[in-house]
Amino acid sequence: MKILVTGSQGYIGTFLSQFLSDNGIQVSGTDIGYYKDCNLVPVDDLIETKRIDIRDVGINEVLGFDAIVHLAALSNDPVGELDEKLTWY
């Protein structure tokens, strides 16, 4: 099985991506990278992550996956306040 995790380097995404990988599932991720150096758990280098804003993901980024777990989001109030309109899209 091949799964795409959006927000794969976020708070939940790091745990889920590693859990899936540890259980024999092929995992790829997309993430804008705001927290790429703040992993809460060690992240396996085998988890391929494409650096992309979720709003720019197109059909080419999602082809070939059996499932997509959508976790990408602006995750806290200070980030949301940078441009409030972005949190509504």
Image (tube, rainbow, N blue to C red):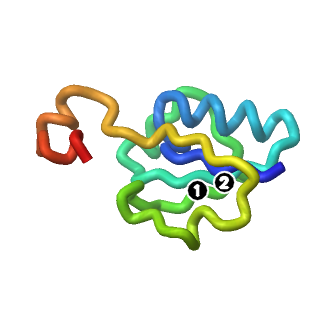
Measured as percent of width and height from the top left, residue 20 is found at 75, 36
What is the distance, in whole Å, between disc 1 and disc 2 at their CAs?
A: 6 Å
Amino acid at circle 2: Ser
Residue drawn at (31%, 38%), measured in percent from left and top?
Answer: 74
Residue drawn at (66%, 67%), measured in percent from left and top?
Answer: 63
Measured as percent of width and height from the top left, residue 42 is found at 64, 34
Residue drawn at (22%, 41%), measured in percent from left and top?
Answer: 88
Q: Is residue 37 left or right of residue 17?
A: left
Please give the label number shown on residue 10.
Answer: none
Where disc 1 sits, the SS reads strand
Task: Work out whether mark 1 precedes mark 2 in sequence or the reverse, and give the earlier one.
Answer: 2
Measured as percent of width and height from the top left, residue 45 is found at 69, 51
Q: Which residue is mark 2?
A: 28
Residue furthest bottom as drawn: 60
Q: Nearer the viewer, residue 64 or 44?
A: 64
User: Which image quadrant is residue 21 in?
Assistant: top right
Position of 64 relative to 8 (above/below): below
How crowded pointer 2 is (Cα within 10 Å; few <14, some 14-19, many 20+) is rated as many
Q: Which residue is mark 1?
A: 49
